[in-house]
Amino acid sequence: MPKNDFFEQVYQVAELIPYGRVTSYGAIARYLGAVRSARMVGWAMNKCGSWHNYIPAHRVVNRNGLLTGKQHFPGGETMKELLANEGVKVEENQIVNFKEVFWDPSVELM
């Protein structure tokens, strides 16, 4: 599968993440049948500004709820602020209520 096709699939899933919920790079990779491609999902999210639709990239975190992509947002605290505006609790760059707000595309989209 060419990289761009994979990136597009990542964006199509990310567009579906509901307001106030988060998912992980690995959960998106699993849903797409590419279990070992969490890092590729991260690369796709880093490039999502070029996608023709808005991608809520702030809703994609690592498997432990850490805001590992925060450096790709302007100002250093933007990712945290966007999540907080949606009611997601973040302390020390980690989602406090991660299990409660986790959205698993393999469950939710089946």
Image (cartoon, rainbow, N blue to C red):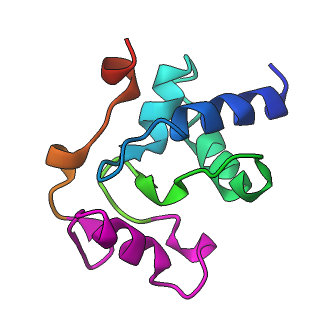
**Relative side of 66 to 36, left or right:** left
Image spot of residue 107 (x, y percent): 31, 19
Q: Nearer the viewer, residue 47 or 16?
A: 16
Residue at position x 54%, y 40% in the image: 15
The quarter holding residue 92 reads bottom left
Q: Position of residue 60 (x, y in %)?
A: 45, 51
Instruction: Report the quarter where the C terminus lies.
Output: top left
Give the vertical position of 106 relative to 49 (above or below).
above
Residue 61 visible? The answer is: no
Q: Quadrant of the N terminus?
A: top right
Residue placed most toward the observer, 38 or 76: 76
Q: Is residue 6 left or right of residue 21?
A: right
Q: How many marks?
A: 0
Q: Position of residue 37 (x, y in %)?
A: 59, 33
Range shown magenta: 68-95
Is 75 covered by the magenta stretch?
A: yes
55 or 64, which is in the foreground?
55
Residue ID at (21%, 52%)? 98
Q: Residue at x 15, y 57 (%)?
A: 97
State left or right for residue 27 relative to residue 96: right
5 magenta-colored: no
Q: Nearer the viewer, residue 34 or 85?
A: 85
Classify residue 71 as left or right of residue 84: right
Name above or below for residue 84 compared with residue 60. Answer: below
